[in-house]
């Protein structure tokens, strides 16, 4: 595999950072352009899902293809090998990539004055608690799906009319920085992070070995090396026994 190559082991951090940066930028650019051109088109979630599938195949072997702080925090919570420094690098790359992709889209599409108003086109009809709950529910579904199997696209259809179905704090920060109100950041951070916490808790309940490994516990029934003891030295025979 590519990640087993010596060059990757020496430049792994740079490749991981670049993968998350470029992938999140491409995702944000595509979402922004789709919402600017045809925000009410029912095929927009399908296009976003197809892009995510392509990005996962491109960058999955390099960085895991998170492109979302919710996924990164979930992986960090479940895998103790995913350290604080690596988690911080992922989060920084995702936010920076979202800002980069959004600014390129705004520069490319001059009619897009306020991208946040386009993304959250139906949020005026719902209260903040309703939108927080919507983001939490569908972030929970998305995170559980990513942790357990694959990508979910149905949330964009069901949650889109309520809160915009962002489910990604990095995208929310980029959109709000370009024209939204900072009070809206409450919806798109508390909601996804609550859903992320629920997904992590569910994974720990479904597979208790995950959180046991997270705290450093080794199950002797599973990890046979822990109860096998040290390897015994080879037996030396003298010349008489050999003859």
Image (spheres, rainbow, N blue to C red):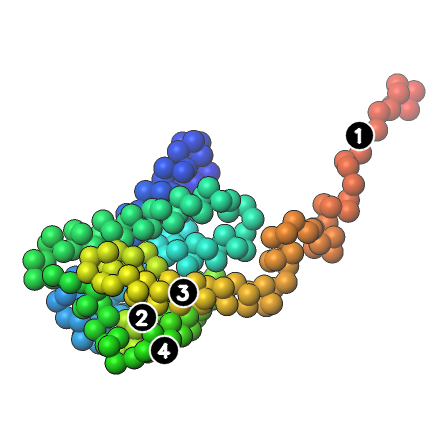
Q: Residues within 10 Å of mark 3 (few under 14, many from 20)?
A: some
Please give left or right for residue 155 compared with residue 193 in the image: left
Q: Which residue is mark 3?
A: 190
Element on which disc 4 rests: helix
- Observer-side mark, 2 or 1, equals 2
Q: Nearer the viewer, residue 179 or 235?
A: 179
Q: Nearer the viewer, residue 36 or 151?
A: 36
Task: Using the numbered discs, state the Cα–Cα distance from disc 4 to disc 3 in whole angstroms.
Answer: 12 Å
Q: Which residue is mark 2?
A: 165
Q: Is residue 23 visible?
A: no
| Label located before the other in sequence (3 or 1) | 3
Q: Which residue is mark 1?
A: 233
Task: Using the numbered discs, state the Cα–Cα distance from disc 2 to disc 1 in whole angstroms.
Answer: 61 Å
Instruction: Point out the residue furthest to the right here.
Output: 240
- Observer-side mark, 4 or 2, equals 4
Q: Do the residues bearing badges 4 and 1 touch, measured as CB atoms within 8 Å?
A: no
Q: Nearer the viewer, residue 240 or 170?
A: 170
x then y, percent, for residue 123 = 26, 75
Q: Residues within 10 Å of mark 1 (few under 14, many from 20)?
A: few
x then y, percent, for residue 27 = 26, 57
Task: Using the numbered discs, state the Cα–Cα distance from disc 3 to disc 1 in whole angstroms.
Answer: 57 Å
| Label located before the other in sequence (4 or 3) | 4
Q: Which residue is mark 4?
A: 130
| Label located before the other in sequence (2 or 1) | 2
Q: Is residue 50 above or below residue 237?
A: below
- Observer-side mark, 3 or 1, equals 3
Label drawn at residue 97: none
x then y, percent, for residue 152 = 37, 69
């Amino acid at each position: 595999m590519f990640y087993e190559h010596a060059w990757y082991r020496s430049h792994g951090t740079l490749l991981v950072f670049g993968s998350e940066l470029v992938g999140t930028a491409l995702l944000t650019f595509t979402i922004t352009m789709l919402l600017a051109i045809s925000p009410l088109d029912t095929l927009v979630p399908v296009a976003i899902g197809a892009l995510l599938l392509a990005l996962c195949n491109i960058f999955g072997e390099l960085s895991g293809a998170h492109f979302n702080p919710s996924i990164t925090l979930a992986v960090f919570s479940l895998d103790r090998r995913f350290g604080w420094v690596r988690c911080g690098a992922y989060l920084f790359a995702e936010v920076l990539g979202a800002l980069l992709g959004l600014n390129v889209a705004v520069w490319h599409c001059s009619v897009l004055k306020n991208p946040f108003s386009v993304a959250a086109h139906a949020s005026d009809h719902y209260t903040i608690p309703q939108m927080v709950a919507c983001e939490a529910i569908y972030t929970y579904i998305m995170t559980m799906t990513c942790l357990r199997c694959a990508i979910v696209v149905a949330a964009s259809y069901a949650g889109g009319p309520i809160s915009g179905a962002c489910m990604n704090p990095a995208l929310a920060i980029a959109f709000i920085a370009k024209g939204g109100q900072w009070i809206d950041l409450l919806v798109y951070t508390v909601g996804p992070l609550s859903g992320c916490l629920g997904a992590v808790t569910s994974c720990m309940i479904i597979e208790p070995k995950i959180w046991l490994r997270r705290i450093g516990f080794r199950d002797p029934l599973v990890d046979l090396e822990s109860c096998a003891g040290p390897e015994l030295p080879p037996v030396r025979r003298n010349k008489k026994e050999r003859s």
